[in-house]
Image: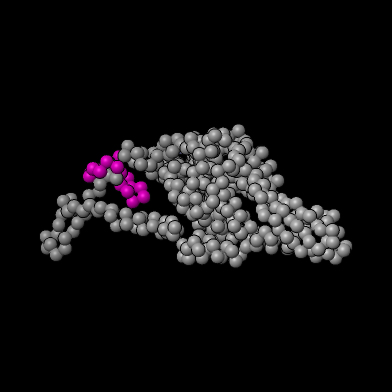
Amino acid sequence: MNFIWKLFTGRNFFLVLIAFLVPVFFCDRSFPQSSTHSQILKRAIPVCSVCGKNIVNRYSIVRNEKFCSEKCLAERYSCANCGVTLGTSENPGFSTIRDIKEREIFFCSRCTKEAGCSFCASRKKTTSLRDGRLICSTCRELAIFTTEDARPILKAAQDMLEKEFGFPKNPDIPLKVLPKSEFLQEAKNALVTTEALALHQTNVTGQFFLSEDGRELQIDLKELDSGMLILEGAPAPMAFDSIVHELTHEFLCRKFYHFEDAKIEEGFCESMAAACSILNGHPSLAERRISNPDPIYGDGFRLIYSMLQEKGWDETMSFLRKNSISIEEYFREHPEEFLDQETMEYLKKHKLKPEIKFGSIQN
Ligand SMILES: [Zn+2]
Ligand SMILES: [Zn+2]
Ligand SMILES: [Zn+2]
Ligand SMILES: [Zn+2]
């Protein structure tokens, strides 16, 4: 199970290796050698990065690569939105993003000034979703609009969490794709302020019975599943990432119940989402978390991901256990969140401290 946490470093190693393998072409034909031959002077004959031909005339250099013609340059560097060739004297500067298909794409400075896709910031052929958010043509190709679109993504996320991390799998999670207004209402009801694309709440409700002498409080808890709610328009790889995050909350809730420090809980959910997105072929969704400045999500991710990398799964689980509160403990500390006001006042008035007995949790 530990291999996965090393993927970031694995990737860096790959890049370093490539750098050493870049061929260097030298040729001494075009430079007159000194008659003394005390030094062998060599001069590179430039080679076009696209067509591979030796370049005898003028050429352009972009990002240390040489191009024999505008045609070859355009093949590598053209604006993904308007198509102009980049790196020329008319369009010297350009910006770069990685799109949802993990391709590096470029935009001229004019297109860069336009508003970007709300998912990936791409400027490529953006259109509006019906709630007004902008979406680029690449994200739109992969976007989820119906519950049927989302079903295989939820299943893939559950399968991966079960196979790679041993999460228990609930095949009957209700699933719904919602328009933005309804999704935000649900997030508000759940007291979550979220930028997330998925939402899943496991709520615990209970019935309690106070014995007549007031010495015993019997509590029967019941789990309510809100179902997995997904925001309409999300590109599938991002929805997958968000679903993993939400399923991890459910895992934590069942295993540990409550974390006083939100950074630890969100950090673990972010780490699982990052790991699964890497396995799902979308490392950029993991990498963007490395520099997330958020004190809960960003700091939490850096704390927990490096713990998983350095100490492994079991030690991370013990850390989570140490920093969490079981539902029984939580109830004892916050009875007012479970009992109605009348009962609370009755207990107070009669100075009752009943012994609490938990029934089994039903779901
Ligand atoms: Zn060429
Ligand atoms: Zn452009
Ligand atoms: Zn996009
Ligand atoms: Zn969360």
Q: Is residue 117 left or right of residue 220?
A: left
**Quarter residue 71 falls in:** top left
Which residue range is magenta in the image? 50-69
User: Residue drawn 62% across and 36% down?
Assistant: 179
User: Residue drawn 58% across and 49% down?
Assistant: 246
Residue 131 colored in magenta in the image: no
Percent of width and height locating residue 238: 52, 44
Please tell me which residue lies in front, 149 or 8. Answer: 149
User: Residue drawn 40% across and 39% down?
Assistant: 78
**73 over 21 or under it: above or below:** above
**183 over 287 or under it: above or below:** above
Q: Is residue 214 left or right of residue 198?
A: right
**Prevailing SS of the magenta stretch:** loop
User: Residue drawn 14% across and 64% down?
Assistant: 38
Percent of width and height locating residue 72: 31, 39
Residue 52 colored in magenta in the image: yes
